[in-house]
Image (cartoon, rainbow, N blue to C red):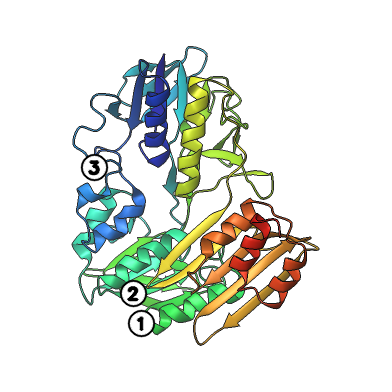
Amino acid sequence: MTYVIVGAGPAGVVAAETIRKLDPHGKVVIVGDEPEPPYSRMAIPYLLIRNIDEQGTYLRKAPGHFEDSVEVVHGSVASVDSSAKSLRLSDGREMAYDALLVATGSTPILPPVPGIDGERVTTCWTLEDARKIAEGLRPGASVLLIGAGFIGCIILEALVASGANLTVVEMGDRMVPRMLDETCGAMLQDWCREKGVNVMTGAQVESIEHRDDVAAVRISGGREVEAELVISAAGVRANAGFLEGTGIELSGGAVVVDRHMCSSVPGIYAAGDAACGRDFSTGDYSVQAIQPTAVEHGRIAASNMVRHGSVTHQGCINMNVLDTIGLISVSYGQWEGIEGGDSVSLLDRDGYRYISLQFAGDQLIGANTLGITQHIGVLRGLIQGQFRLGHWKSRLMDNPLLIMEAYLAATQGA
């Protein structure tokens, strides 16, 4: 058997290692479109502030980790011929497979802004991007960040640590709008402003004019900010365009997969950001562009590539944990709540502490927290365990901080 994995991120690496354990004699190939060894994008902020070097971003640190068991090929896939079970790289090389995994991740989206393609503008997605940003980072450097979503806030942390003079422009009405509710997102914005970050929400970049030594960024409302460096973190899209014309069902550019992570074409699987998979909380199919989901997808897909149908995907729980200049925010499950459901929140605005719980009947289905780090793993356990809380629901409605007590009662059958 020849197993080909397109994509050298966490999903691809975990899949390759899983296949090797289950099939010691099969040929395993990872195709990555970057010249570096497989690395973690989530480590790039630590590289920017020099907490690690480039080798520190590598997913596997041991020299020669892949040499004996997995072949790593550098190149980008141009097309797939599903009937012939082969793929062609952009340089003309062809490769046959018996089972194929698409784990190509996402590609940054650049907003349609005049001047966005100028030399002072970059994304922060690859090691090549990180090298360009590092050249311009120094204490007092003027930097403008487009986007205050999850990825944007991870980058923000590194930019603040570098001592840069930072402005953040977010088109949503709050920071991290796809993760935090109105109260939580607004508090995070206040926190960042208190730390010296100029945060503009409900604002859009309208144009970027490149002058001799700065980029003049025009922002809605007639405002203008000059920046030596502009970083765009305005979102991503699934990187699966090379599958068009293969007959594989796509949704929003991502591969629609079944409960075994298999696409609509037998023998072709998908994982991570490139997969439209089952959401544990809702049962619907969506893209969860987070690393824990990528790793779980990769493991399940690999198991089924070796022995189809051996592992069933129960769905990934939507979960995000974000550290923004020392303030931890968390979202789990259906944090926005559901129609007809109950909710409760507790707020300490001055202390930057907040918790919001969402219920369906007497089951906890979602949560948002800010500045609360104790027992946040318990929230996931309560949601994923789908426990019936009984009278403990009313206790949580009175005091949502009793999550550990509720968890112990639920798991011990009290």
Quadrant (top left, top right, bottom left, bottom right) of the N terminus: top left
**CA gap, disc 2 to disc 1?**
8 Å
Q: At label 2, which amino acid type do we have?
A: Leu
* Quarter of image, res 312: top right
Q: Which mark is residue 61?
A: 3
Q: Nearer the viewer, mark 3 or mark 2?
A: 3
**CA gap, disc 3 to disc 2?**
33 Å
The residue that disc 1 covers is: 196
Looking at the rendered structure, the secondary structure element under dot 1 is loop
Mark closer to the chain start, 3 or 2:
3
* Quarter of image, res 155: bottom left
Residue 272, x across and y down, in percent: 48, 41
Residue 21 in sight here: yes
| Mark 2–mark 1 CB contact (< 8 Å) | yes
Which residue sits furthest bottom?
A: 350
Q: At label 3, which amino acid type do we have?
A: Lys
Name which residue lies at 46% across and 57% down: 111
Q: Nearer the viewer, mark 3 or mark 1?
A: 3
Q: Nearer the viewer, mark 2 or mark 1?
A: 1
**CA gap, disc 3 to disc 1?**
36 Å
Looking at the rendered structure, the secondary structure element under dot 2 is strand
The residue that disc 2 covers is: 166
Residue 161, x across and y down, in percent: 28, 71
Q: At label 1, which amino acid type do we have?
A: Gly
Categorize mark 3 by other alpha carbons within 10 Å: few (<14), some (14-19), many (20+).
Answer: few
Along the line of sight, the residue nearer the viewer: 83 or 52: 52
